Amino acid sequence: MSCFTYDAADESATATLGALLAELLPNGGTVALCGTLGAGKTRLVQAIAEAAGVDRRDVVSPSFVLIQEYQGRRPVYHLDAYRLRDEDEFLELGPDEYFDGDGITLVEWADRVENCLPKQRLEIQIEVTGPQSRRFRVTAVGARYAAVVEACQKRL
Ligand SMILES: Nc1ncnc2c1ncn2[C@@H]1O[C@H](COP(=O)(O)OP(=O)(O)OP(=O)(O)O)[C@@H](O)[C@H]1O
Ligand SMILES: [Mg+2]
């Protein structure tokens, strides 16, 4: 399995990771984000979206809206499974439309809807290691993402 760990000392280091992911993720790419409340899932989405040309202030946790679409240089779809009852409720949102689309799809609380995710995806587990620091564990699930992980690791 292709994976690496990235220790971000502060938010700007998180932004660096986000910018790199925005550059390396293929069209139609999916990122599954996991980590506790306040870990930094939305913050990483902001960084990716901003690097894709979206105004970062437009990116807020879609906990109530469940899905937000941002139009940058390419579309960014932001999904949040936190408030969903179960996987069926997630499927009712029609997530495949996003997964099969041309943009990048970013799913917060992805572990709650694991069975509904594309078989190939990038998984990012975020751990709080200090007030400003976070540990990102980035894993390629499926061969398509191995190259993304390798390129990302090389450039950090
Ligand atoms: N290095 C860092 N990377 C990301 N966020 C950081 C970092 N240091 C501090 N923070 C802060 O941690 C918080 C992360 O909040 P964020 O909303 O991104 O978490 P979340 O994982 O999306 O939580 P939720 O499960 O509630 O959606 C923000 O207030 C952010 O400013
Ligand atoms: Mg969030």
Image: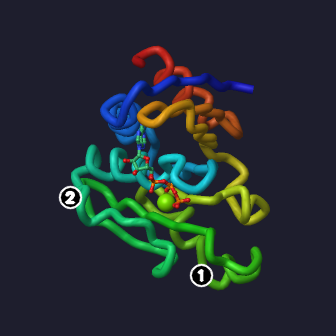
The disc label shown at residue 93, or none: 1
Where residue 90 sits in the image (x, y, percent)? Answer: 67, 77
Instruction: Give amino acid for label 1.
Output: Leu
Indicate which disc, 1 or 2, sits on the residue closer to the N terminus.
2
Left or right: 23 with respect to 83?
left
Residue position marked by numbered label 2 in the rendering: 55
- Residue, x 35% and y 52% (percent of image)? 46
- Residue, x 75% and y 26% (percent of image)? 1
Where residue 7 sits in the image (x, y, percent)? Answer: 51, 23
How would you rate the neighbour count of disc 1 (Cα within 10 Å): few for under 14, some for 14-19, many for 20 or more? few
Left or right: 33 with respect to 117?
left
103 vs 127, nearest the viewer: 127
- Residue, x 69% and y 60% (percent of image)? 117
- In this view, 77 is above or below 36: below
The count of marks equals: 2
Query: Residue placed farthest to the front in the image?
Result: 131
Mark 1 touching mark 2, by CB under 8 A? no
